[in-house]
Amino acid sequence: MNFEWTQDEEAFRQRLREFLAATLPQDWERFSQHGPASPALTDYARTFCGRLADEGLLTPHWTREIGGQGLDPWHQTILAEEMWIAGEPRGGQYMNVNWVGPTLIRYGSDAQKARYLPAITGGRALWCQGFSEPGSGSDLASLRTRATRDGDVYRVSGQKIWTSYAGLADTCFLVCRTSDDRKQGISILLVPMDTPGITVRQIPSLIGEGDIHEVFFDDVVVPVEARLGEEGQAWEIIGYSLTNERLGIPRYALARAALDRAVALLQTQGEFAGEAVRIEAAHAAALCEAARMASYAIVDRRCRGEVIGAESSSARFATVMAERRVCEFIVEYLPQALADAHPYLKMHHQRGIVAGIAAGAAEIQLNIIASDVLKLPREPR
Amino acid sequence: MDLSLTDDQIAILDAIDTLTRPYAGATLHEAGFALASDALDRDLAEGGFLDIGFDPDLGAISAALVVERLARLPQTVEAAASALIRPLLGDATPRPLCLVEEGKTHRPVRFLAPGATVLLVGPDRVRSFVAGPEHVRAEPEALYAYPMGSLIAQPDDLTDHAVSADDVRTRWRAALAAEAAGLLAAALDSTATYVTDRQQFGRPLATFQALRHRLAEAQVRTNGLYWLAMKAAATLDAGDAALAALHAQESARSCVYDFHQFLGAMGMTLEHPLHLWTYRLKALIGDLGGRGGQALVAANALWG
């Protein structure tokens, strides 16, 4: 075991930091408060991701054949850490490199890869994830949005909700029902958001402007070639996507960075001398580092080509514990942060509070750990 | 970064598993409160497994792997201090090595018996002596699953060690975290087995979500602790060690309660071995100032 970064890994991190320092605008910390899904940040992200792509830093962990440099998952992790700590200037495009692209590479047809991957590797694409419905959140397999086959097309009707990025996305990764079988009756369609019959309504949220929407599909016509994988293969594909998404965002890194920032502010104010505040900060740091190491253990296995399963839920829940403790620490000891005094800490709060909800609720992660890591018998359904 | 085991580490852990297989498979019905094993101690010492930390090529990280693996056994031997702290003192130091904080000599001490080395760790100095019968009172009724003794006297003449007290405490924290990681893993495994087998309301206890989520959280804590402990042993950094020990003591506190709760009355009996791991964890919870002590050291290391 070697817990030291290699020279190459250190140099890669340093290169990213220098790129960020040279590229981000002066008022970035306040600007980034708009949130990753806001029109302002989405617009800026197209410029930023284009520059990242020019530098070969947008998808360096992808293989060379599809626009990457074949770098290993440690580089992917370092890239994600530095971007997330910086407030994620890639906006919603982080999803592209984390899981949309890898899922298309694994399951997409040649035509789909040719159509979508260049826009992703060029920093121009924005996707949204059509998963949750009013009646289907954690119980995703109960979804009712229906895609009915009609010759060479599907006709899609239904409703999605709490959909991030939908207002500005160009394509929807849409999970819909093609038969009544609970899990084997679900399929994925890649649907351009300007297709007639799609209506998007923004829902005001705690976590930033433009982040949460409901999306209505009213007899939307989608060609059969837009289906990802086979009919009924969605459950397998989603499992692959979510394994990537759960670990795609290194939330522990931003949580620790926010904690360090909060401590520095408290020290400046002369409010970090008492034992109570120091003990509470250390508890939060321990959870951040436990989550970091749980995530690194999985990255290490990925580097060796191992297939990652339920262990990602364990690392994800460790991150949820860390995010919660850091958010609570800041609210308790620096309440002014949420009143806009410290944009970076407010930004962290808005992103941190969804850790236990996005990419599968924390309770779903615990169910997965119980069944698939601890091998406990399943609950009766 | 490379978190895989080296070939040497794989070979060491394989050898330990082979050596300890008869012990791991022992019948544990009414094993008693503390299950010390002189035979296991002898086997490990003869095999050199507790001296691995003396080898600079293997280092403290390999010693921590050994400590974590041994802590999973129902039998106990003094391994953590010997494997991780004894390399600072020299291989002539008699085992077991008993760690005592200056100013807290009234606390019961793990493995303290005549012939043991008592290491007194003060704020700025480290001293030791070999305990005689006049220095020790055995505590056979102690509710900890280690053999415990109390220090009732000290000789006037103590051996001074030219080592940093802070370095000793850092290794103590890494050792504590590695041992706690193994104890938690074994206790979790034992509890998971019990709730899978035990039926109530016509189905296994393990199918009730109220238990499943708390056990899953214990898995998350145990996994995180393992990695924090290994990192602490690898870096021997004061902050890493304090965070690892803090996570160990915090996790022990929450998980031990849950494990006993889920075993119900069975966990209150000595017919089930759960206490062998949980009541060792309880013995570790108060070391070096407990959670508050580790947290303050961590805060100093991280933020000054």
Image (spheres, rainbow, N blue to C red):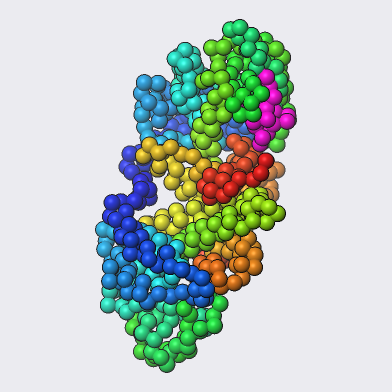
User: Could you tell me residue B42's position as x and y percent?
Assistant: 32, 74
Give the main secondary structure, helix, strand or loop, of the magenta stretch.
loop
Q: Which of the pair A111/B271 is nearer the observer?
A: B271
In this view, A187 is above or below B210 = above
Q: Which of the pair A270/B286 is nearer the observer?
A: B286
Q: Which of the pair B109/B28 is nearer the observer?
A: B28
In this view, B232 is above or below A316 = below
Residue A139 highlighted magenta (yes or no) = yes
Quadrant of res B169: bottom left
Describe residue B202's horizontal placement relative to residue B38 as left or right. Answer: right
Residue at x 43%, y 89% (from the top left corner): B135
User: Could you tell me residue B239's position as x and y percent?
Assistant: 46, 59
Q: Residue furthest top?
A: A151
User: Could you tell me residue A365's position as x and y percent?
Assistant: 59, 43
Query: Which quarter of the image is occupied by the C terminus of chain A?
Result: top right
Residue A327 highlighted magenta (yes or no) = no
In this view, A320 is above or below B240 = above
Quadrant of res B89: bottom left
Badge count: 0
Residue at x 37%, y 82% (from the top left corner): B116
Describe residue B125's horizontal placement relative to residue A260 as left or right. Answer: left
Residue at x 71%, y 33% (from the top left corner): A205
Describe residue A362's horizontal placement relative to residue A307 as left or right. Answer: right
In this view, B180 is above or below A177 = below
Residue at x 57%, y 59% (from the top left corner): B194
Describe residue B222's horizontal placement relative to residue B162 as left or right. Answer: right
User: Could you tell me residue A297's position as x and y percent?
Assistant: 43, 46
Q: Magenta segment range? A: A129-146
